[in-house]
Image (tube, helix red, strand yellow):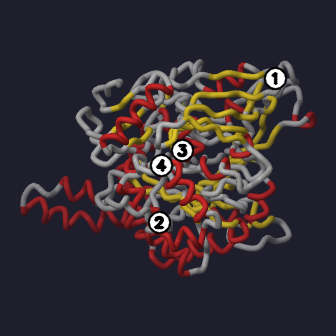
Amino acid sequence: MIQPDSNGLYHPASESDIIDLINYAVQNKRQVRVRGAAESVSNAVYTDGYTGQAGSSNINIELDQLRTVTPDKATMQVTVGGGCNLGFDPFDPSGVSKADDSNNLFFQLNQLGWAIPNVPNAIHQTVAGFISTGSSGGSMQHSFDECILSVRMIDGTGKIQVFTKSGNLDDQFYGVIVSMGLLGIITQVTLQCVPAFNITGTQTTSVATATEFDFFGPGNSTQVSFQEFLTNTEFTDIMWWPFETLKRAIVWKAHTMTSADYNQQTGYPPNFLPKPYQSLFYLKDTGSHQLPVELVFATGFKLIATWPDWFNVLFETNEASEKRAAELKPLVELIFPYIYPMLANISFPCNTPANPPQVFWDNWLGSLPMDKFEYSNNLFDLAYAEMWIPVEKTMAVVDAMQNLYDTAGYAATGFYTTVILAAKSSNFWLSPAYNQNVVRINIMWFNKNIGDPVAYFQQFWSLMESNGIPFRPHWGKSLPAMGDAYMTANYPKWSEWKTLRGQMDPNQIFVTDYWRTQLAIPPLAD
């Protein structure tokens, strides 16, 4: 049997290696988990007791050796190894994912003139990890799930199983994919691709009440409703800063270019002249030198977002310094709400005639992954909780959140941004978009803060409950307390999925304490 590396990760080179690890785990009552890109919360990724070093009795796997990309040009389909990243992962501990993207999925598809129509904002995730958590790009018109034609898995008994898409929505294919690694290890995925395409779009920064849609209302003579905007905009991502002295929104949107979108400035196919989207934090020309805005903003944001924790630590050396801190703290608290907008204006000032919205046009791979810069540069260390809510509840959820921000103030807003996206209805049983188009509310917490992010997120989960707004969480992010009653009420195929899980992992080698608690999986009888 293969052995782990210094990080305590096993690197199987074949399905036979995985079967050996599973058989060992069954015989010795060990847990098995697959790392992916480790984008999910740590407890959702690893086995119990994993420390990031060799020595764990459980088995944590990285599929960096299973990343082949095999296209079928006749059908425009691709079969890809489960460990292949969608794009470059700069924090891949194996170092296999290449910075030139040559061995990552999306680059290879683009080289073929192909694309996937639903592309996430950041593309470091592995194929298996992305689909296992029900993840999605920001679009209600395109679905990654619909591209999945088959998966090849090794279940908890060491058996290789292949599940193929069918028209029968009760087929087990629809149960095995969004399963958080609890049914088996995905070694291959076959995807239906589309021809590569170009996009054009804008990014507009304004106060929240001045967006092109009616952010907080049902729509009016000049603004469509937020729900209508999310439904009809092909690709979109909204960043909302609810802090009392900011109340700003950045609306990024794009659509597939048609013949009417091409002109002399953009060039015409096949002589297209891309003007890529520029991140909020790209290098800006200050005249005399290049100012690394991303560094300035990230540093300032960390200081503001972790207030007053760093301030208390700074002045806790002795009684005199603590007294001085007590004198200074009210002054700092007074000026912080005005420093924050000044900091924001360095990177994303509201648009004016002198500072118009950004306009861009690019190929699909160049600008749909709009957050890859922030991720690759590790600008922000954040925890997330994402609620997927029926799109019909868009106005209700935004209004409820604004009421919370107004009444709770800083305790609710922090200095954070909330990201709002859309996702198309899915047929996968445990997808948070199962049988419904959704608005996605992605709430952030700065990990340098002293405290528990789950305690911060709880106010939003409780808000949904008190307002009668149903939601399903993103499986890779912080989760509320769920259990069997919650799952039964919110996932119509929960009972069938539980039965399937028991069949595919009868020894519960994929079940950790975290997942046992979240999904109320009863322990095996002695």
Q: Earlier in the sequence, mark 3 or mark 1?
A: 1
- Is residue 356 visible in the rendered image? The answer is no
Give amino acid for label 3: Ser
Q: Secondary structure at mark 1?
A: loop
Q: Residues within 10 Å of mark 4 (few under 14, many from 20)?
A: some
Residue 336 occupies quadrant: bottom left
Gap between marks 3 and 1, in whole Å? Answer: 29 Å
Query: Where is mark 3, residue-wise?
Result: 347
Q: Secondary structure at mark 3?
A: helix
Give amino acid for label 1: Phe
Q: Is residue 487 above or below residue 357?
A: below
Query: Where is mark 4, residue-wise?
Result: 505
Q: Earlier in the sequence, mark 1 or mark 2?
A: 1
Which residue is located at x 26 percent, y 65 percent?
329
- Depth check, front residue: 494 or 461: 494
Gap between marks 4 and 1, in whole Å? Answer: 51 Å
Q: Residues within 10 Å of mark 3 (few under 14, many from 20)?
A: some
Query: Where is mark 2, residue-wise?
Result: 413
Query: Where is mark 1, residue-wise?
Result: 272
Give amino acid for label 4: Asp
4 or 1: mark nearer the eye: 4
3 or 1: mark nearer the eye: 1
Give amino acid for label 2: Thr
Q: Residue furthest left?
A: 319
Q: Secondary structure at mark 2?
A: helix
Give how far across and how far down residue 133 sits, in percent. 55, 49
Which residue is located at x 26 percent, y 54 percent?
310
- Is residue 93 visible in the rendered image? The answer is yes
Q: Earlier in the sequence, mark 4 or mark 1?
A: 1
